[in-house]
Image (tube, coloured by chain):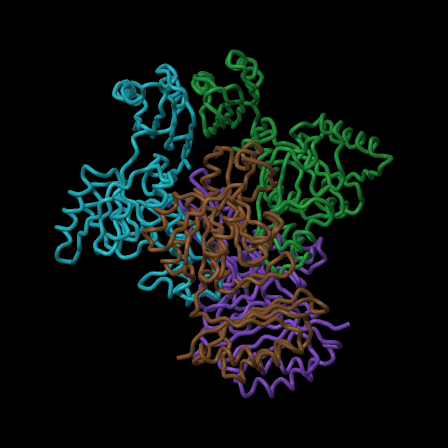
Chain colours: A purple, B cyan, C green, D brown
Amino acid sequence: MPSRGRLLVSCPDRPGIVAAVSRFLYEHGANIVHSDQHSTDPSGGLFFMRIEFALARLDERLPDLEREFAAVSGPLEMQGRFTLEARRKRLAVFVSKEDHCLQELLWQQRSGDLKADIALVIGNHAQMASVVEPWGIPFHHVPVTGDTKAEAEARQLALIEDRADAVVLARYMQIISPTFIARWPDRIINIHHSFLPAFVGAKPYQQAYERGVKLIGATAHYVTADLDAGPIIEQDVRRVDHRHDPDDLRRIGRQIERAVLARAAGWHVEDRVLVHGNKTVVFD
Amino acid sequence: MPSRGRLLVSCPDRPGIVAAVSRFLYEHGANIVHSDQHSTDPSGGLFFMRIEFALARLDERLPDLEREFAAVSGPLEMQGRFTLEARRKRLAVFVSKEDHCLQELLWQQRSGDLKADIALVIGNHAQMASVVEPWGIPFHHVPVTGDTKAEAEARQLALIEDRADAVVLARYMQIISPTFIARWPDRIINIHHSFLPAFVGAKPYQQAYERGVKLIGATAHYVTADLDAGPIIEQDVRRVDHRHDPDDLRRIGRQIERAVLARAAGWHVEDRVLVHGNKTVVFD
Amino acid sequence: MPSRGRLLVSCPDRPGIVAAVSRFLYEHGANIVHSDQHSTDPSGGLFFMRIEFALARLDERLPDLEREFAAVSGPLEMQGRFTLEARRKRLAVFVSKEDHCLQELLWQQRSGDLKADIALVIGNHAQMASVVEPWGIPFHHVPVTGDTKAEAEARQLALIEDRADAVVLARYMQIISPTFIARWPDRIINIHHSFLPAFVGAKPYQQAYERGVKLIGATAHYVTADLDAGPIIEQDVRRVDHRHDPDDLRRIGRQIERAVLARAAGWHVEDRVLVHGNKTVVFD
Amino acid sequence: MPSRGRLLVSCPDRPGIVAAVSRFLYEHGANIVHSDQHSTDPSGGLFFMRIEFALARLDERLPDLEREFAAVSGPLEMQGRFTLEARRKRLAVFVSKEDHCLQELLWQQRSGDLKADIALVIGNHAQMASVVEPWGIPFHHVPVTGDTKAEAEARQLALIEDRADAVVLARYMQIISPTFIARWPDRIINIHHSFLPAFVGAKPYQQAYERGVKLIGATAHYVTADLDAGPIIEQDVRRVDHRHDPDDLRRIGRQIERAVLARAAGWHVEDRVLVHGNKTVVFD
């Protein structure tokens, strides 16, 4: 009974990449189950590929595969990465006082729609403990103030170090420091509201109401040092009209936020998101 | 055989408005066919209502209705406006070099989906003449340069003065002067692309591509002196992904633009859009 | 401080209805906060209206209002119904083995998005007890077999009699008997999958997969004796493609089902759904 | 300057397909620009792949490529097909009395969104001639009656024989005979309305209105002998509510039909649709 693996590659585009990679897998007995690829430009652009393959005893053979793949990836200046479908990614979820995104992740984890384990939840307020604990998941209260931010982040980093593979900010209302981000690049996912046009400053839903927007939305993105401007993973919108007051907009916004964040987290843990520069390729 | 009319009112909200207006229509023999209303806040807010009614010989009775309605509207500090469904609004369409929005308006006019007459088309380039003329609609070439802008606008204003009830900017790539706008307030409709996040500066589709946005959209709005920031009438988006290059985004953008502009123009000519401050109430 | 009420009316359409109803409310000191109306045909059709109004001490004055409204409703052959916003509707949720719809209702109740109380949950299997009990809501296990159906329904009816105002079938995999339905007309809401084209028989998601449909959806409707053909309250779809296997379709279907059922239940408990014949008017 | 080609393959799935095909292209100097693949089941299923590649002087080298590819396709029991992007497909559009789908195709052809040439239009009524002729496209009036159907189809087949690569039924209200279909398998595209639930019999929009559906849609599919049940290419829906009367539904339906048909035709002419059994794989 073969098990499933994934191979993710990126490299400068040139002829022969698919031939080289697919021959490698074929010669090692792997059957390609699904494959997606993308080239930003066949002349001088970047090439990205995600392959799902089936191979017997993959877990024990993985170290050999990785070592031998160097003969393919080296000449092509390729970044390559193998992962095992059976080795589910572990998520650390950061929360503040709102639970809608957290609840969605917990629910989708249990239903099997989110193919990951929520390993721990960290809140800068205590009140989400009661939401998390019935699920048998550890909750850690790590308060953050202006003075204690460095220590709080040190504690967060220690908590997630060996326990998580990615961090999901589920309406976590604190800014993550560049130091923290640099240690978890392309592995911290955030959700924030999005409007057409964009509104800067406080109370965005109030501003959206005053401007009479007809669509409200949310964007999930990787966190970079440039606040709310990291690579976009997913976006969605819902239609609103003049009958919706600011509370309605916030309520509808919550529904979009939880759906968009859960989709983004789901694609991340299935290795469907490749980052290059400030944008993503999502093989959904 | 009764004909159809519309009554649009706006006033400070207070008890008794609906009772007063509906009694007026009832006593004049009008039957309310459809009614929409909206209050921004029942205590101290603004009240908006659009009523479609049926009344025999409405065209000849309209002057009396309007005069007698003053007895209702005066005490309620109400703006009231009657229109006849049979008196279709006349549109002046302004174009430059792209025809997708113009074609959609022409097509929807003929199919009957757009309940208006396109009375004339004005282009700052000559090339749309060949698109317009087979439809039997006058096309006027009014070139605009930095030096001749004032004269060009004077000529445009003269052309539309007695011929049009509203102006639709169908990808017209010139800025309308505040003087022009002041003479046609809440009657000039524009379409522009919209992204999450918004992009300032040139080549927005290129920027959207570089940022890897997952949604592109368009916004139709009334033109005010504050460029592209007038009251929003309609917005829509379409999903895109990494496979779409800037040309694809522009192509998809065109599809959204023509649909959104046609919906906005359609609501305007059916008196479904009420403006207050910088937002709209759309009784669609 | 006035409290909020709703007035729902339906009657044969004729001139003067809005004038009569709005005058009644005005003379009783009520301020109309929101109003929606619909006429199937101004000549000989049916007229529907939903009014939200504000009135001081509404709870104590309600019996008088109802009695005095007869002077309006009688001559107009009108069905009228007053409800109090503060008197939240109580829901009985029926479940089997799947929890996605149940979870959504529980979560939306707590977040305040669903303006109702889930008074009790009844399952024909025992396993949802562990989902329900952490929320402090009573769970009743009422097994149903071919032989015991009549007794089971009698027990269900006894359980909900004084405890619930409406029943939500949250993926309850039993057919409700006509006897049961007749006792709760227009108050039992069901959710089922919907496809284009429709598939009859077992394993609809497998059939949809084999047919290569590009959209899958769900429909929420009131339960009538005509199975799955009662008045539609809400529908939605999601886009799928050849990459989705039957399990994916089922997973996506669950997401649509829970969203559509929650919207339908939410509109019902806010008195936004009026039924006539086999269709609904939804004042959302 | 290399030109673009496409290779479409389908075969029983087994290890090594991608390796064999990609090596073939690499060894012939082709650079893979884009590639999509799909396996219905890696064990015993069917494998589909569409590759876009760039190769210098492709038009003259195509016959050699096709001949030499037999060495790859033979052992893998593979159907393979090469096409040239520069050799645009020619469409025959069949119409009756409605022009919305025809107009959309004409417009998208000219804007370049539809990468095909509309070679001729055939109408069973004469009135579309005036729509078609300004575009400089031949219109043929081929009346069809019960008695003359066989002759009419013979004439249609003669007209399209050497002039078209595919037929688009743009609201053509005649049934195509099995004989005709058998000569143009998987090359006749039809559009029809779609509802949840489906309605059989006449006046579907009236039925949808009477049932109070909340979504109306359209399906584009290949025509098979089984009426309206051929492989689905594309579907879409739009939201409606109780305010839409049957005429509104028809109007909205027309908007969906023209968009869905144009997307389906666009994918067909770019060789993005592979048919197997009664379903499609669409590499959009």
Q: How many marks?
A: 0
* Residue drawn at x 24%, y 47% as measured from the top left: B121
Location of residue A236 in the rendering, given as x and y in whole percent from the top left corner: 50, 54
Q: Residue at horizontal 38%, vertical 62%? A: B205
Q: Quadrant of residue D274?
A: bottom right
**Is residue B182 among what the camera can see?**
yes
Give the quadrant of residue A109.
bottom right
Quadrant location of the N terminus of chain B in the rendered image: top left
Residue closest to the eye, B160 or D148: D148
- Residue B54 % position (x, y): 38, 22
**Looking at the image, residue D165 lies above or below residue C145:** below
**Quarter holding the C terminus of chain B?**
top left
Of residue D246 and residue A146, the one placed in the foreground of this image is D246
Residue A185 in view of the camera: no
x, y percentage for residue C148? 86, 34
Q: Is residue A259 above or below residue D16?
A: above
Q: Position of residue B118 (x, y in %)?
A: 28, 41
Identify which residue, B160 or D63, lies in the foreground: D63
Please indicate whether residue A272 sits to the left or right of residue B237 in the image. right
Q: Nearer the viewer, residue C16 or A184?
A: C16
Q: Would residue D123 appear left or right of B86 to someone viewing this image? A: right
Vertical side of C92 occupied by A133: above or below: below
